[in-house]
């Protein structure tokens, strides 16, 4: 192909979008499910069709979890009936029932948990105030509540629309959480607090958990070098929705990048390994497994796609790697196209096990949505109709260029030590919360 003909081919390609439609039409892609397996197999086949080599699956065991029913009752009234979309068990919640006084902790900031919570049912918002210096992950709020003695955890969506949020609890060492946990819609949370704050309520969760099997999808392009650039996403999604944004879009992007990079394979000085992880939504299990199997010293850089397509402007956490900022700036300048960067640590996606264990330079690539938090993500509203094919094509062009630059032999990306990463987490006030959730021993 001529030097720039790949751009036109990518901008008219349907390969990534067709794969996105395939993923969302599978249905339930919960980690360890048959749907996740079928999505992984479809991704393997799509990477092979795009021109990547040695497309295959790598299986591993996980703690499975299957949703049953959940409810909230006050007195003789079931406020949230079983199987309502307004009330959902959080994945990896233990089964069980807890009764206690309903307590509103508002945003669930660290200082809010200093109250007497022993035996109480704690309600926390899914967001933090705009003025607060960092986003507080759901699992941190959950474990702060559990450590304070709460009998159950109620995660209230801040996004209106009768949408209960989901999202896993549990740790790597103890995958099933300590106390029952449910997500409720913004509207149901308001109703509960208006009617029953300070009164006794009962949270019930019915679910099953047993050992299950997940899998990572692998394929490669470029020369057979020891050094490699990873282009990654995750295949799994929560069982309540299509998982279009989170993260069908990221896996569609990986397929589209494989298609584009196959056209530019002769320009690659370094092997590019594509990995579509399983079991991300239940604790980065697939990426932790792969990081343990990989020679981290040989991983030059990672482009992890998780949150792309939600907005037209790409954003990237660069985790304090100045060289990553530089290379991304070169791509933005070359196309005269905005790309936003965040130099802080972003520990909540599949690049993180490589960063924290081996100081591997990594981008967490998402997109600018104009909102704080997940928006439609982790709710039943995460559907294909909210995404646009032109955004996939535009972003694929930018990320193809970025990957080729990273794979260039003349591009050097300095690494950091684990101590450097931990020091950055301390400066950004993230280390304490990650220790509470078991993510930073």
Image (cartoon, rainbow, N blue to C red):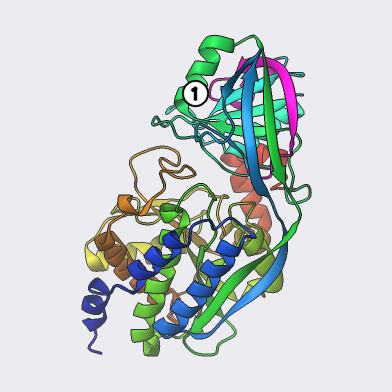
- List x then y, in percent, for residue 382: 41, 47
> Looking at the image, can residue 388 be seen?
yes
Circle 1 residue: 188
- List x then y, in percent, for residue 256: 37, 72
Q: Is the residue 146 above or below the residue 418 in the image?
A: above
Which quarter of the picture shows residue 275? bottom right
- Horizontally, residue 400 falls left or right of residue 334, namely right
- List x then y, in percent, for residue 33: 62, 60
Which quarter of the picture shows residue 212? bottom right
Q: Which quadrant of the figure contains the N terminus?
A: bottom left
Is residue 95 within the magenta segment?
Answer: yes
Q: Which residues are magenta?
A: 91-115
Which quarter of the picture shows residue 195? top right
Write the residue at 59% across / 11% down.
197
Pick the residue in front: 285 or 197. 197
Q: Is the residue 208 above or below the residue 353 in the image?
A: above
Write the residue at 73% across / 45% down.
438
Pick the residue in front: 327 or 220. 220
Write the residue at 24% across / 85% down.
3
Pick the residue in front: 360 or 313. 313
- List x then y, in percent, for residue 400: 36, 73
- Horizontally, residue 415 falls left or right of residue 176, namely left
What crowding class fits label 1: few (fewer than 14 Cα within 10 Å), some (14-19), or many (20 or more)? many
Is residue 219 within the magenta segment?
Answer: no
> Which element type, helix, strand or loop, lies under badge 1?
helix
- Horizontally, residue 140 falls left or right of residue 372, namely right
């Amino acid at each position: 192909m001529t030097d720039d003909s790949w751009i036109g081919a990518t901008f008219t390609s349907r390969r990534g979008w067709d794969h996105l439609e395939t993923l969302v039409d599978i249905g339930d892609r919960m980690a360890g499910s048959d749907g996740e397996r079928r999505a992984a197999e479809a991704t393997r086949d799509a990477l092979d069709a795009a021109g990547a080599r040695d497309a295959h699956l790598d299986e591993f065991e996980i703690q499975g979890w299957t949703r049953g029913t959940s409810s909230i009752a006050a007195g003789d009234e079931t406020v949230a009936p079983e199987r309502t979309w307004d009330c959902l068990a959080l994945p990896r919640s233990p089964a069980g029932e807890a009764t206690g006084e309903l307590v509103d902790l508002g945003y669930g900031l660290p200082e809010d948990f200093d109250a007497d919570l022993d035996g109480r049912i704690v309600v926390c918002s899914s967001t933090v105030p705009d003025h607060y210096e960092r986003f507080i992950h759901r699992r941190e709020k959950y474990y702060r509540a559990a450590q304070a003695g709460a009998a159950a955890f109620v995660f209230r969506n801040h996004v209106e629309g009768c949408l209960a949020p989901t999202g896993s609890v549990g740790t790597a060492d103890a995958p099933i959480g300590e106390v029952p946990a449910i997500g409720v819609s913004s509207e149901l949370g308001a109703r509960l607090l208006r009617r029953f704050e300070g009164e006794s309520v009962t949270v019930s969760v019915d679910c099953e958990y047993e050992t299950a099997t997940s899998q990572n999808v692998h394929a490669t392009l470029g020369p057979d070098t020891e050094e490699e650039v990873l282009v990654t996403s995750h295949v799994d999604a929560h069982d309540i929705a299509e998982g279009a944004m989170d993260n069908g879009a990221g896996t569609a992007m990986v397929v589209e990048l494989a298609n584009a990079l196959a056209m530019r394979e002769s320009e690659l000085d370094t092997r590019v390994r594509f990995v579509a992880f399983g079991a991300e939504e239940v604790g980065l299990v697939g990426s932790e497994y792969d990081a343990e199997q990989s020679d981290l010293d040989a991983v030059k850089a990672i482009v992890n796609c998780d949150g792309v397509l939600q907005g037209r402007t790409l954003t990237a956490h660069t985790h304090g790697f100045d060289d990553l900022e530089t290379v991304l700036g070169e791509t933005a300048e070359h196309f005269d196209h905005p790309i936003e960067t965040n130099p802080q640590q972003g520990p909540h996606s599949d690049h993180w096990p490589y960063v924290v264990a081996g100081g591997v330079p990594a981008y967490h690539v998402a997109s600018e949505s104009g909102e704080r938090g997940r928006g439609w993500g982790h709710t039943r509203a995460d559907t294909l109709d909210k995404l646009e094919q032109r955004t996939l094509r535009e972003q694929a062009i930018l990320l193809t260029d970025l990957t080729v630059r990273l794979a260039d032999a003349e591009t050097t990306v300095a690494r950091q030590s684990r101590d450097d990463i931990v020091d950055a987490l301390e400066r950004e006030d993230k280390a304490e919360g990650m220790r509470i959730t078991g993510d930073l021993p």
